[in-house]
Amino acid sequence: MKSLILCEKPSVAREIARVLGCNKTSKSYIESDKYIVTWALGHLIELKMPEHYDPKYKNWNLDDLPIIPEKMDLKVMKQTSHQYKAIEQLAKRKDVHECIIATDAGREGELVARWILDKIRFQKPMKRLWISSQTDKAILDGFRKLKSSKEFDPLYASAVCRAQADWLIGLNVTRALTTKFNDPLSAGRVQTPTLSLVIEREKQIQSFVPKEYWTISAKIGESTAYFEKNGEKRIFSKEQVEAIINSTKNERAKVTSMTRKEKTEHHPLPYDLTELQRDANKIFGFSAKKTLNVMQKLYEQHKLVTYPRTDSRYLTTDMKDTMFDRLQSVSVAYKEEAQKLLVKKGKMEAANIFNNDKVSDHHAIIPTEQPVFLHKLDNDEKKIYDLIVKRFLALFYPKHKYEVIATTLTIGGHSFVIHDTNVIEPGFKALTGTKAVSNTLLSSLKQGQEVGVSSVKSEQKWTEPPLRYSEADILGKMEKFGLGTPATRAEIIERLVTTEVVERQNGRFHSTQKGKQLLELVNDDLTSPELTATWEQKLEDIAKGKANPDKFMQEIKQQTKQFILEIKNSDKAYKVQNLTGSKCPECGSFLKEKNTKNGKLLVCSSMDCNFSKRKDPKLSNKRCPQCHKKMEIHDGKAGTYFQCRNCNVVEKAADRKKTVSKKEERKLVQKYTKDEGFGNSLGDLLKAAMNKEDDK
């Protein structure tokens, strides 16, 4: 008898098959005398759409809302149905006695596998492979310690609740807003409160009133002392500034007090996904999605890091014995940093990092025992891997010790302070090049001593509004309010951009007019980070078996009804944004500009027109009369037309039937060359062939 192993992706399936010695390869699985390894292609199953319950829902209608099916059913995704059928056939084989779920060890991974097995009505025993890295050792250890699938029933229930809640709220509210205000308006359980955070910061910036203030500095040797009163350096009175400057002219500075405080900075915790995404954004300008994509390659393809989609920054106690092996694995690429640690036999200084109570599904992100060869990584992979390794190596270094020195001097009866930091022991900060330093002047000063002042000057400044959020800021806010999970936050941020409610400008998020209007139209409760955070906490409780999934879904259904009722009764107005003066070549409505990954795209402002739903078109050989760039070619009901995305020029083709590609031209000529009376030239042949096609 054989075990059917269900993986999430073909790449992971191939690795597991290799480790288990499966070498009989088929189109949809890899087999041995003991195992059959097959794979999904991400999700193969999804929740049915409204039109699958009733054909009338294919057309969006406000009166039909809310759509709340009595029982939410599943359907096979059409584009990957071939792989679903292959898994179904394998599961029904008589020599298969069990299924081992080997999808990603997380909520979504559980959903991928369970929905497939539920759809095929799998009744045989099920086990779970739960591993945090893709190395050969981790895979073999995982198969030796397979878990019962029943242990993960609460996780599956949580995943189902999340999917159904997003369907009910997202689909109903989006349809209601779109049909009520006649423009594509997307709202959701997580994306709307995230948008609210961006717009709230925008309001703070718009309402900000700058104030003028001054600072006063005194040059003493190579050091600079600043005027301070009650810990405040800013002075908001110009008269006061002038008085201080006048009273300190030609005066010497007298040391009135010196305080030294020795401080210790503890080791930074290893990364979870959100913290890694934040640092990658701050240091390299990476988007959250880009960081996650790079991490997936480091995890799946290179096998150099542990499971990326984690919310924990601690390690489990059973990992202590693996630390030296992991240290050795990075020592070749990080020889200078790691060799002295190996001499000490890899003694870890940060012992508090091992805490089972602070690890949920997965521990923190750290390097695996897999040897690393940096030349096999691209630049982005090297950057992310370097962050992870440096954070891991820091755990083996001593704590960072430094001394904070505050020297207060009196000049003309006014207090000036010099703040300085003296590094005593670089510790783990040696990884970033921090060295022990000392200030010669401060080390030589004594209380009561007088020193010369070379200059005293003021500097005029203005208070500044808060900065717009960077991606790192947004991720931090989402984590603080419990919006989404580490695995979904990057996707939510990208959705806000693609639906044009926010824009990225120089690494900062700006709200658009569409986003501001949307937040005014949507229900107040749905904009609240607190409400969504409560829902996320309940989903987490369901995953831990502490909450009832049926009760949660009843709350979601009731909330959905309330949201739709509020939208229906709304008397608020909405103005379609980005309208142009150009008319739609299909229906005559005004066109509007839409931002896409390839630039601006003109779409119809009418929701009923197909021109509003078109995909990115192909380029033709026709040149724009203004900028001379190639124009896009479109086929509409009224015929073929060309559009320049650069200039937004739209031109209708003279005759749709006469516009053919080179490939179509060859087919037509070949088809009719045997007929008589077409003339001898290629042009005559083509013209006659096209005319004959038109006659049909």
Image (tube, rainbow, N blue to C red):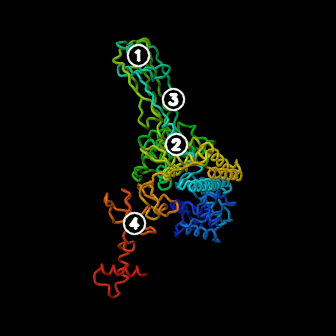
Q: Earlier in the sequence, mark 3 or mark 1?
A: 1
* Residue corresponding to mark 3: 264
Q: Are marks 4 and 2 in contact (CB under 8 Å)?
A: no
Residue 240's image quarter? top left
From the viewer's perspective, is the residue at label 2 or at label 3 nearer?
Answer: 2
* Residue corresponding to mark 2: 199
Q: Nearer the viewer, residue 276 or 686?
A: 686
Q: Nearer the viewer, residue 24 or 617?
A: 617
Dot 1 crowding, Cα within 10 Å, few <14, some 14–19, many 20+ = some
From the viewer's perspective, is the residue at label 3 or at label 1 nearer?
Answer: 1
* Residue corresponding to mark 4: 641
Which three-letter amino acid code belongs to the residue tagged 4? Tyr
Element class at badge 4: strand
Which three-letter amino acid code belongs to the residue tagged 1? Ile
Residue at image position (59%, 69%) is 85
Task: Please give the label number shown on residue 244.
Answer: 1
Dot 3 crowding, Cα within 10 Å, few <14, some 14–19, many 20+ = few
Which three-letter amino acid code belongs to the residue tagged 3? Thr
From the viewer's perspective, is the residue at label 4 or at label 2 nearer?
Answer: 4
Q: Are marks 2 and 3 in contact (CB under 8 Å)?
A: no
Q: Are marks 4 and 1 in contact (CB under 8 Å)?
A: no
- Residue 123 seen anywhere in this rendered image of the structure: yes
Q: Earlier in the sequence, mark 1 or mark 2?
A: 2
Q: Earlier in the sequence, mark 4 or mark 3?
A: 3
Please state if 170 lies on the left or on the right of 454 as rendered.
Answer: right
Q: Are marks 4 and 3 in contact (CB under 8 Å)?
A: no
Q: Quadrant of the N terminus?
A: bottom right
Q: Nearer the viewer, residue 318 or 558?
A: 558
Place of residue 236 in the rendered image (x, y in percent of width and height, measured from the top left): 45, 23
From the viewer's perspective, is the residue at label 4 or at label 3 nearer?
Answer: 4
Q: Earlier in the sequence, mark 4 or mark 1?
A: 1
